[in-house]
Image: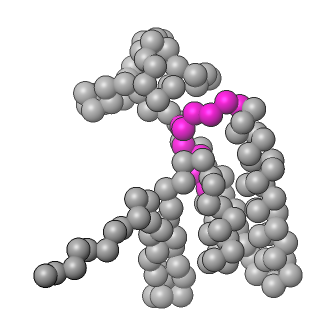
Amino acid sequence: PVAPPARVPKDPLRVSKICNGTSMLIGKKDFHLQQVGRIIKEFHPDVMILNQGAHYVSDEQLIQHLNSTVIPHIVNWQDECVLEKIDCHFVWRSTVPGHPHCTQFTKPAESVEEMEMMIATSPQYNWDKFKG
């Protein structure tokens, strides 16, 4: 009998060597930025790009998590970079929320009002909670 294949984690780290093997690119789907500290500890990056996508949590919950967990990890990482005399770069990127029926659009929408109404009346993914 043949052994079953090893179980692949649902959202594994994606690690790639780049720049002729002198750098490593690590990707991790982490909707609520829960893995930042673990990735810093394990990989000691010199560039970090965090992307907060449109994954709704209340403003209070998001701010509390950023202030109590994510920002302290980033500050500690930056402090370690200074001690090791490494230029470490941090980029924060936000992704705008999507909209219902996106696959049916073949070009950018022309009416902001129409799109806002579409999102306001769609409970999918809590898009209606995003404003501005």
- Residue 52 in magenta stretch: yes
Residue at 72% from the left image edge and 36% from the top image edge: 61
Question: Which residues, given as a range, are shown in magenta?
Answer: 50-59
Q: Quadrant of residue 101?
A: top left
Q: Position of residue 73 (x, y in %)?
A: 76, 62
Q: Is residue 119 left or right of residue 72?
A: left
Residue 111 within the segment the image draws in magenta:
no
- Examine the residues drawn in magenta and state their main secondary structure: loop
Q: Is residue 25 left or right of residue 64?
A: left
Q: Residue at x 72, y 72 (%)?
A: 88
Total tally of numbered discs in the picture: 0
What residue is drawn where x is 46% and y is 19%? 123
Identify the residue at the far bottom of this view: 21
Question: Residue 17 at x, y = what percent?
Answer: 46, 81
Quadrant of res 20: bottom left
Q: Is residue 82 left or right of residue 53?
A: right
Is residue 25 placed above or below 72 in the rendered structure?
Answer: below
